[in-house]
Amino acid sequence: MDEIRTKRSFFADAHEFAVVYNLYESAVKQLALKFEILNSEFNVLYDRNPIHHIESRVKSFESILAKLEKKGLPLTMEAAKSGVNDIAGVRVVCSYIEDVYRVAEMFERQKDVEIIRWQDYIQTPNYNGYRSLHLDIRVPVYLSDRTEYVGAEIQIRTIAMDFWASLEHDIRYKANKSTLPEGINEEMCVCAEKIAEIDRQMQDMYKRIKASEQEKK
């Protein structure tokens, strides 16, 4: 691939690249702030934070190209905007499984956000054991002279789910596929189920502790 020629098919000049990047970066900032506000309000009302931490990122130029190639789409910014749903991404990591759905429901009530697709990999884990709640959304970014609607992907998961996903990515996706020992994929699925069971157990213990505290008041 001629990288210089490909970049020119994406952007007329460096200024155009900066404008587009700023648009997606503004979207993730706005989304992260929405979740921070929800977390803060929940703490005031219920004296606890459902969100453990929030991460956000904008895909690099190279990552966008790789995604377009994988999907067999034209190597243009227009194709990226319409065909790559996670150029802007926000990951919300919660303490417990119930918090994942509680945070998603609070976010869903925000009228300026359009939820295009809801994928529940917690109730129905992915083939490799991956668990997370994915929301493909569009959010308005209010600029000086116009409003742009920007697509983004939101992943909401527990600390345990995030732990497995991070290590699975490091072990399997960053490794040379041809050198992976036989049976690794099956072992990863077994580990995912063990971690999911611990996740459920931790939530159950938390609920029993809170119920006990309420009885003693």
Image (cartoon, rainbow, N blue to C red):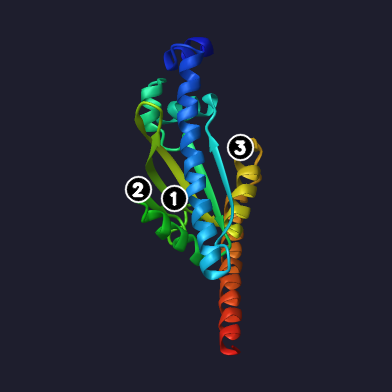
Which corner quadrant of the image does residue 105 belong to? bottom left
Q: Amino acid at mark 1?
A: His
Q: Amino acid at mark 3?
A: Lys
Q: From the viewer's perspective, is residue 55 above or below residue 122?
A: above
**Quadrant where the C terminus is found in the figure:** bottom right
Residue at x 49%, y 26% (from the top left corner): 21
At a point 57% along the width and 71% down the height, the residue shown is: 203
Relative to the observer, which residue lies in front, 104 or 128?
104
Asked which secondary structure carries label 1, the reply is: strand
CA distance separating discs 1 and 2? 8 Å
Q: Circles 1 and 2: CB distance less than 8 Å?
A: yes
Say which residue label 1 marks: 134
Sequence order check, earlier mark of 1 and 2: 2
Task: Answer with left or right where residue 104 lies relative to residue 32.
Answer: left
Q: Is residue 124 among what the camera can see?
A: yes
Q: Dot 2 corresponds to which residue?
A: 117
Q: Which residue is mark 3?
A: 177
Q: Secondary structure at mark 2?
A: strand
Residue 122 position within the rendered picture, expressed as x and y whole percent measured from the top left = 47, 59
Which is more foreground, mark 2 or mark 3?
2
Number of dots carrying numbers: 3
